[in-house]
Image (cartoon, grey):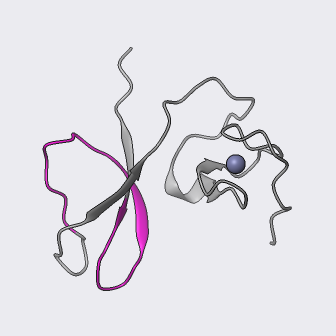
Amino acid sequence: MRIRQRYRMRTPSTGREIVVEAEPDQIYLDRETGEELEVVGSLLPLAPTPSELPWTVENLRFCSWCDQLTQKDLNDCPVCGRRMEPLRS
Ligand SMILES: [Zn+2]
C-alpha cells in the first residue's frame, strides 16, 4: 500500500494552515481565496501509532513541544515522544 505524503500548507494572506495529501510537483490553491498555498513542511509517514483516528484535519492537533501534527486522542506525541498538554474541550 502506498501512503501519499502529507504536507502542511499555509494560505499566505490568512496564515491558516491545512494538511493536504499532495503530490510534490502539483500546485494547490486555497479553496476560499484562490491563493497558491505555501508548503510549510511535510509530515512524517504514518508510522503505526496506538491511535485509531484517521489523519483528517478534524482529528489532528499540533504537538505543543515539536509542533508536529498528531492524532488528538494520543497522550504522547508519536514524533518526539513527549507528553502533550490535555486537550481543552
Ligand atoms: Zn511532539
Which residues are the magenta region? 9-29
Q: Residue at x 81, y 43 (%)?
A: 76
At x 21%, y 41%, the residue is 24
Percent position of residue 74, x then y: 77, 44
Residue farthest to the bottom? 13
- The quadrant of the image that shows the N terminus is top left
In the depicted structure, whether residue 84 falls above or below residue 5: below
Q: Position of residue 52 (x, y in %)?
A: 68, 34
Snapshot quadrant of residue 85: bottom right
Type of secondary structure dominating the magenta stretch = loop
- Residue 66 horizontal/vertical position (percent): 65, 53
Q: Quadrant of the C terminus?
A: bottom right
Q: Residue furthest top?
A: 1
Q: Residue at x 29, y 78 (%)?
A: 12
In magenta segment, residue 2? no
Q: Quadrant of residue 28?
A: bottom left
Give percent across and percent down for residue 70: 64, 47
